Image (tube, rainbow, N blue to C red):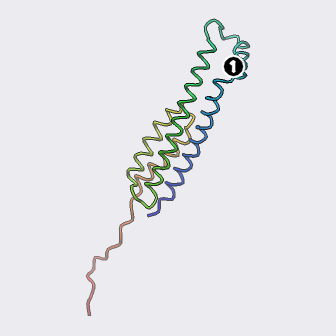
Amino acid sequence: MKRTAEIVFTVIGAVFFGLAIAIGAVFANMGNNPQARAELESILSQDPNVDPDQISIDQLMSAMTTGAWTVLAAGIAAVVIGILCIVFLKGNKKPKAAGIILIVAGVLLTFATFGVGLFGGIAYLIAGIVALVRKPKQPVVDEEPAETY
């Protein structure tokens, strides 16, 4: 049985999680960038709702960098899991295992990327459900006895 639909949705999900990796890498790089720090300070100084005594730029930059590394690690894990599931689906080797892994990974890694990988998680979820629901075709058995001559 061909598993083309599941493989296509898994590849689409991996591409979206690849975009999450790129976003995480950009924000992780901004943590050490003095120009980004100055830009953040100017944005916060212009906002009348922000009290400069309550917000520490160092803490904000540290939190942003930590979150970016979390998104980066979760995105890499999602792509690796997607490749593993494609291997399981190719040739109809372990479609049930791939379906379960895709559903669990789609839900958990969407939260782990703080919603950045939402579309990738949805694609993994669809691929996992289709992998579990699709049944292999049963061969047609003729119930009438064959006549011998």
Secondary structure at badge 1 equals helix
**Which residue is outermost to the top?**
53
The residue at the point 66 percent across, 11 percent down is 50
**Which residue is outermost to the bottom?**
149
Q: Whole-percent x and y of residue 99?
A: 42, 49
Answer left or right for 47 relative to 79: right
Q: Amino acid at mark 1?
A: Arg
Q: Whole-percent x and y of residue 14?
A: 55, 46
Answer left or right for 51 relative to 76: right
Q: Quadrant of the C terminus?
A: bottom left
Give the vertical position of 3 relative to 145 (above or below).
above
Q: Nearer the viewer, residue 105 or 64?
A: 64
Q: Whole-percent x and y of residue 37?
A: 69, 19
Give the vertical position of 121 relative to 140 (above or below).
above
The residue at the point 62 percent across, 37 percent down is 22
Q: Quadrant of the N terminus?
A: bottom left
Give the vertical position of 88 relative to 30 (above or below).
below
Q: Whole-percent x and y of residue 139?
A: 35, 70
Q: Check disc 1 and report the residue beneath it.
A: 37
